[in-house]
Image (cartoon, coloured by chain):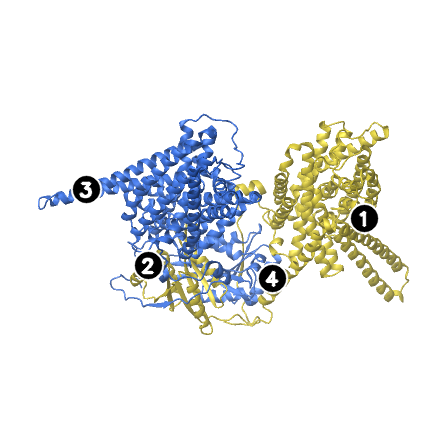
Chain colours: A blue, B yellow
């Protein structure tokens, strides 16, 4: 039977298509019909939809970034609020640097240039693992923060639901999860309308506000919320940096497009790059406008009413239809912002899983072509955060943004290193060709590479400094948690990777002669009682081997005698061994006996345990039976040289 | 091969003792070493211990019965408190009737004469099911009420733990559960000390109190809690009956001894009967004494301080060592009262399970000879009640006692019917012998039976009336829940019984010719990838039959081509069928294929599915694998004519 590959006759190989399986009605209604793998390319999206899908995270941060700057400045009294505008300007400059830096990434990595991929290719394994951990953490926080801020808008308009904010937030996460389980194209269409609704409403607010401000007709907030600060702190540099750190959350989500390039229509890179530029311009303009207006009207940061709510009701003269429309739009964009993470988290975790560092289920596309496991995991983790932090943006914020800036830094450092490497290689090639031709062309290109390296390097340094500022100023408020979680995740990646590699090595057929032959079988059949099911199993056991032994574990003398009587009548000459179990254990004595048989087996012999398995008609009936077969199988799977056969007997 | 019982050679039957299996260290420390079935008789207990084990429930109700009478009378103002003593007297008379009635039961049923057994034998199936449901419900409530009252005593002495009463109560239930998992003899020894400590402390309180009262030196409660009644109700008969209903909870637990006769030493019935008399006498004396003293000192029912606490600090002049000892003793007996249910609930559920009306796991004695499942189930259900009702005795009380009085009524009605039946049979026999001898002896005995029937019948009527009063006066407060739960449990008993009988009939060998012979095997082996494990499974499949087909479900073209290449090299002429799965399903297409093969199989043919099962070294590693083998087995177990073989491959 053993043959070498060379002289083997090729076994016959045939093909068969699988039939279509209709999902249950509920699944079909919630998730949609299954999509064939052949449908995949049609799921790509155009720029307009891409802006809606990938930009909502970045744009929505304008709903809280200004407020969170003011929250910190408030420690030094409302006189310090004026500093919010220069801080916002500094953040917009940072946004410009990051955007230009990412433009280069998008063109260099048309198949998706997330921090994970870029650092894996240019900085090595550890850097990519850190980037992966940082991004995954941040996607979870994006969902928690955005949905919590969305609920805060709802509370501003309807204060009576304050006590319900945690259940409302969790329900919203579940809603976004369901939409994403349907697939990205349809969710894009769903999200396009609210994103543009938000842009129209917020630009209207800002423009009307600025016109009224320059006309002098924009007063202060009527009846502002109470400023909840008791002890005044001095206005130190540290406090200003803390306020700046809070404001940098406006930049979260900028990297989303570079991770999701493959979702765009061809030409992917160009479409993605244009979308990124538009997004940055809109974000910067909105953020500056909102900050300027908030200062002008004297808005006060508060848990009871958001700054956006104070601003819109001042610009639109009270809580009329325009106010309600603006708050609704803000709430919607925040909820939709969570969608960005639902597009990116599963995609990144599938990448990491494909690199064997997360469970491989995450790389499996479900019936709607989406990464079902990733979507469900993200929803579960974000809901947990919302419950633990009681849906408070201010409490969640210190955990947020570190991961983003860590991944920005790694990504841009990776890009800088890439340009340096390409430049060196090109120069070496050029020098090789120098003797033959002129040097003009290659030196010009080298200048291009140098500029690119400088731009990405500068971006890396800026974002690295911001990350350090954030980690230091927010350390005791909660940032330390992230500084524990990210290394722990990296360690988990490595353990999982080790496991997969270990298994692959042990299963590998390289240098593998041939699997061992089984020359004989010893069959053991546990008999709990003598009935139609166990006799059917006995019949099957007899087809396997002449060497069949039945075993009864006796916890009760009377029952054991009854079984011996029945066996004498029905056992068909198969020997029955009764094991007394004075401690009333059913599984242990059997496993012991089988262990002994396995240890004493001859070379080439296999122990086959034939388990009569009673299958009740309804699943809940299983609760009424002892499930000995299940426990036995669990125990036997770990024994070498033992094969377990289930002979089911269906009660119909 | 097929033979009749007559001409069969008897198969060889041999015996083997199972080795001793040491439990894990933690289990051993918490639960104790396993006990052999041969140890069972030594677990019987003497009267002194029996009183501690079975009487704590009944005795401990003195800790709340007086208070709960006053809670209701308080609706009519504190002037109505005086009625508490006549109500208590009526309850003690009822106690006397029930005790005498149960004396007869204990002698008639030396193997345990719970309401379940008595009504099963004398009133039929439905009555026994109702009695069983009523008792099981009440055991659960006993644990919840006793532990909650115990925690109320703790709160009286240490008001600062008020907010923690639910977690404290749940922790106490867990503690009693652990002690019971060790077994009844040892738990008897543990509980004997606190029971006697309680008796000494409470009798001291009552005697000292009564002496001081007659000497005129017993004043009123200093600084009594505030009486929490806002609207005064008129003192109607309905209100008095509600107060009486609350007081009847003093009788709960009286039936415990009759259920637990088998736990006593020989002569069982005599020992149990004497213990019951002692218990009733002690209970009646304490209850009357406490009620009289509570009225004398003007105690006020309150959630903040129990009546017992008010009484003892008045009798002992403040919160000194004697006060603390009395409160500690009361707390302990209440916690220990829960133990009565932990002795009886598992015993009764094992009886019901042996009658095939509850999952048979409940009839299985664990390694310490106790009914592990019943103990754990009781602890879980009681903890749930404590959490739902926030450990409040007053909220739990309306659910309590209906079950007890329902089972009292059924039990005594059953006894009455029994005496009538015996009397009639004896009279018929006597009349048959009349012609030969005189009639004097038999007529005297008939008078004995008549008296017995009258006593039990009177008991049944009294307790039946009390049950009706309870159900009517407490209906809207929560008693309706029990009137739903008990019929639901009876329905569940019947469904479970139907299932077990149905299965037994279908498995029965009566009128069963012989199991079908398996003439040929068709073997199917699913191959996810070609590696050492799947080749080992292929080898095994080849030993079973010449007709082996390998199946690969292809979700990905590249992988499928790789596998076809590998199969050409390693497949050893076994044909490989590739099923394309465009919807990326792994299990459905396989099951469909096997279904078709099963439908098309020849008579006597069996389809054997050989599943290569990868077994990782550590259980958590399973999370990193797809578990396709598990889902496949679950789906195939329900297919007729299909046998599933697991060929494990252990990664070591």
Q: Residue at x 64, y 34 (%)?
A: B161
Rendered image: mark on residue A562: 4
What residue is pinned by disc 1? B238
Q: Secondary structure at mark 1?
A: helix
Q: Nearer the viewer, residue B407 or A513?
A: B407
What residue is pinned by disc 2? B559
Mark yes or no: residue A487 visible: no
Specify the subunit that label 4 lies on.
A
Q: Earlier in the sequence, mark 3 or mark 4?
A: 3
Which of discs 2 and 3 lies nearer the camera? The answer is: 3
Q: CA distance from mark 4 to mark 2?
A: 55 Å
Q: Earlier in the sequence, mark 2 or mark 1?
A: 1
Q: Nearer the viewer, residue A272 or B404?
A: A272
Which of discs 4 and 1 lies nearer the camera? The answer is: 1
Q: CA distance from mark 4 to mark 1?
A: 60 Å
Specify the subunit that label 1 lies on.
B
What residue is pinned by disc 3? A446
Q: In the picture, which quadrant includes the C terminus of chain A? A: bottom right
Q: Secondary structure at mark 2?
A: helix
């Amino acid at each position: 039977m053993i043959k070498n590959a060379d002289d083997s006759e090729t076994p016959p190989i045939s093909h068969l298509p699988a039939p279509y399986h209709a999902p249950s009605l509920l699944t079909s209604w919630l998730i949609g019909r299954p999509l064939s793998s052949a449908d995949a390319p049609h799921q790509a999206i155009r720029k307009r939809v891409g802006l809606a899908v990938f930009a909502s995270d970045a744009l929505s941060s304008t709903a809280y970034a200004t407020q969170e700057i003011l929250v910190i400045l408030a420690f030094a009294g409302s006189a310090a609020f004026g500093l919010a505008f220069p801080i916002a300007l500094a953040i917009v400059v940072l946004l410009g640097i990051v955007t230009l830096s990412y433009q280069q990434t998008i063109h260099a990595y048309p198949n998706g240039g997330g921090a994970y991929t870029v650092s894996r290719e240019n900085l090595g394994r550890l850097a990519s693992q850190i980037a992966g951990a940082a991004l995954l953490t941040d996607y979870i926080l994006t969902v928690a923060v955005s949905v919590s801020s969305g609920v805060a808008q709802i509370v501003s308009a309807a204060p009576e639901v304050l006590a319900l904010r945690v259940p409302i937030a969790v329900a919203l996460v579940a809603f976004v999860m369901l939409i994403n389980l349907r697939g990205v194209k349809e969710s894009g269409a769903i999200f396009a309308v609210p994103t543009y609704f938000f842009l129209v409403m917020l630009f209207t607010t800002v423009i009307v506000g600025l016109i009224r401000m320059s006309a002098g007709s924009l007063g202060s907030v009527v009846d502002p919320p109470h400023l909840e600060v008791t002890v005044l702190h001095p206005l130190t540099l540290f406090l200003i940096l803390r306020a700046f750190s809070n404001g940098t959350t406006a930049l979260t989500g900028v990297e989303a497009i570079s991770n999701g390039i493959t979702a765009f229509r061809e030409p992917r890179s160009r479409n993605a790059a244009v979308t990124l530029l538009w997004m940055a311009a809109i974000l910067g303009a909105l953020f500056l406008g909102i900050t300027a207006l908030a200062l002008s009207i004297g808005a006060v940061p508060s848990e009871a009413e958001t700054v956006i709510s104070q601003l819109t009701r001042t610009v639109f003269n009270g809580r009329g239809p325009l106010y309600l429309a603006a708050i609704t739009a803000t709430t919607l964009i925040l909820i939709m912002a969570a969608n960005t993470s639902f597009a990116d988290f599963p995609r990144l975790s599938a990448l990491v899983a494909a690199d064997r560092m997360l469970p491989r289920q995450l790389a499996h596309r479900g019936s709607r072509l989406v990464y079902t496991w990733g979507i469900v995991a993200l929803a579960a983790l974000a809901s947990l955060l919302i419950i633990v932090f009681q849906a408070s943006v201010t409490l969640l914020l210190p955990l947020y943004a570190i991961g983003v800036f860590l991944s920005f830094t790694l990504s841009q450092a990776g890009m800088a290193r890439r340009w340096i490497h390409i430049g060196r290689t090109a120069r070496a090639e050029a020098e090789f060709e120098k003797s033959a031709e002129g040097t003009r062309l290659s030196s010009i290109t080298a200048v291009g590479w140098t500029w690119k390296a400088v731009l990405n390097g500068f971006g890396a340094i800026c974002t690295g400094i911001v990350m350090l500022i954030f980690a230091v100023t927010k350390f005791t408020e909660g940032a330390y948690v992230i500084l524990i979680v990210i290394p722990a995740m990296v360690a988990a990646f490595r353990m999982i990777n080790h496991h997969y590699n270990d298994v692959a090595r042990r299963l590998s057929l390289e240098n593998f002669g041939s699997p061992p032959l089984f020359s004989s079988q010893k069959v053991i059949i546990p008999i709990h009682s003598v009935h139609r099911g166990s006799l059917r199993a006995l019949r099957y056991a007899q087809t396997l081997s002449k060497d069949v032994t039945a075993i009864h574990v006796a916890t009760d003398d009377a029952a054991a005698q009854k079984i011996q009587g029945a066996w004498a009548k029905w056992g068909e000459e198969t020997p029955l061994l009764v094991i007394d179990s004075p401690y009333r254990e059913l599984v242990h004595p059997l496993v012991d006996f089988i262990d002994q048989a396995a240890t004493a087996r001859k070379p080439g012999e296999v122990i086959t345990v034939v388990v009569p398995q009673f299958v009740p008609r309804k699943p809940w009936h299983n609760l009424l039976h002892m499930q000995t077969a299940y426990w036995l199988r669990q125990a036997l799977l770990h024994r070498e040289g033992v094969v377990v056969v289930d002979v089911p007997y269906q009660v119909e």
